[in-house]
Amino acid sequence: MVTNGACPYSYPFSTAQGLEMDPAYARMRAEQPLLRIKMAYGQEGWLALRHDDVRTVLSDPRFSRAATLEADLPRAEPDLPNTPEMAANITNLDQPEHGRLRGLIASAFTARRIERLRPFVDETAQRLVTEMLVAGSPADLVKAVCEPLPVAVICELMGVPPAGRSIFRAGIEAVVSNATVAAEARVAAVQAIITYMAELIDERRRDPGGPRDDLLGALVAARDADGSRLSEAELNMLGVTLLVAGHETTLNMIGNMVVTLLTDRSRWDYLLADPDRIPAAVEEMLRVIPSGPYSGLARVALEDVELTGGTVRAGEAVLVSAEAANRDPEVYDDPETLRLDREPANILSFGYGSHRCVGAVLARMQMQIALRALITRVPKLDLAGEVEWRTSTLIRGPEAVLVTW
């Protein structure tokens, strides 16, 4: 908990579990919107809590991601060692390098390519629900639907064969379950994914005219305006980043959303009465449901920058809380209340600015399709006991959700 002592404040404020926001976020957003914090590792830093400030930190070039590679950032866990792949990770780049890489991704990760996945996503969701129903009640919704759907979708998008999917799943689990997995094991898991990704990339390079029409092949072939391509390190880390981000967040948010709907039956019934309400409901749940136990991906100020409540000095680190920003009363009416009919607007759940999540459209598609399949196929779905929550400093989501019908 936040203490009444002098700053810096210990952060995270509490050990987050379940789907509730620590009330300290709302209190601090009102009283100290730029909060001095101290985490388990690293130096002190700042936490931005208001919507305007969060957008500024995420989009203003005076705040750098590249500078974080050499900084002793405030963090909840020990750092993994820096590698050439880490330096090439798009999340760690500033302009103009970030813009070049983002442009190459955009040329391959097109809206048309994502939309072409819609039938596959729908068929996969329907198949998983059918298999759950055939297996019988009760069932663990995480194992039955939430976990296998995004695995199948992101691997289909990337062109990962079924035989390789277990490698990615094991590696991703080791990375995000950092509260229970030693740093050495996490490094080994990341390296296993990178090694396998390199093998897939090499296949695409050796057979560029092969029968595959997948994102990984498109990234290998992508060229920028100067004719240059992605380097091996860029391709490796980009593939890993897309796999992890495109899988883990979606998995957890589908589970979080189902739990949110079933803990108040009126919410489930509202969508059951008209499933076309699901897209707006997904946006509102993205706004309200915390995606992680603390704020991630710090920036380092390259010069002094004035934010609401104070100044971030050059060289200082600042984190942002998209969850607190998504409940800012300056932006949202009655922000603490989940209203499934709220008009979607300005949520920061997928980031903001040039680093905004490139897979946001695909993530939304999966959430909407999964909820529609469950609501229309299993209208009497209900929780069969207490939800078991994951223990991680990166991700908030259910470990298991037992359901009956």
Image: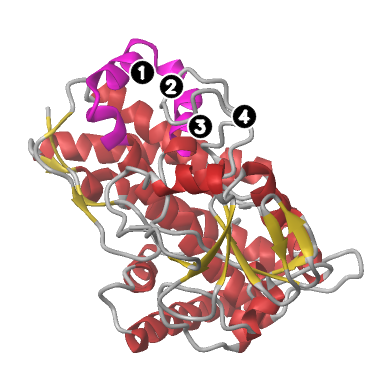
Disc 4/disc 3 C-alpha distance (Å): 8 Å
- Per the image, the residue denoted by label 4 is 345
- The kind of residue on which mark 3 rests is Glu
Q: Quick one: SS at disc 1?
A: helix
Disc 1/disc 3 C-alpha distance (Å): 13 Å
Q: How many marks?
A: 4
- The kind of residue on which mark 1 rests is Leu
The answer to whether the residue labelled 2 contacts the one labelled 3, judged by CB atoms less than 8 Å apart, is no
The answer to whether the residue labelled 4 contacts the one labelled 3, judged by CB atoms less than 8 Å apart, is no
- Per the image, the residue denoted by label 3 is 283
The answer to whether the residue labelled 2 contacts the one labelled 1, judged by CB atoms less than 8 Å apart, is yes
- Per the image, the residue denoted by label 2 is 340
Disc 2/disc 1 C-alpha distance (Å): 9 Å
Disc 4/disc 1 C-alpha distance (Å): 20 Å
Q: Which secondary structure is most common in the magenta stretch?
A: helix
Q: Horizontal and vertical percent for residue 100?
A: 81, 66
- The kind of residue on which mark 4 rests is Ala
Q: Residue at x 37, y 50 (%)?
A: 251
Name the residue nearer the viewer: 303 or 235: 303
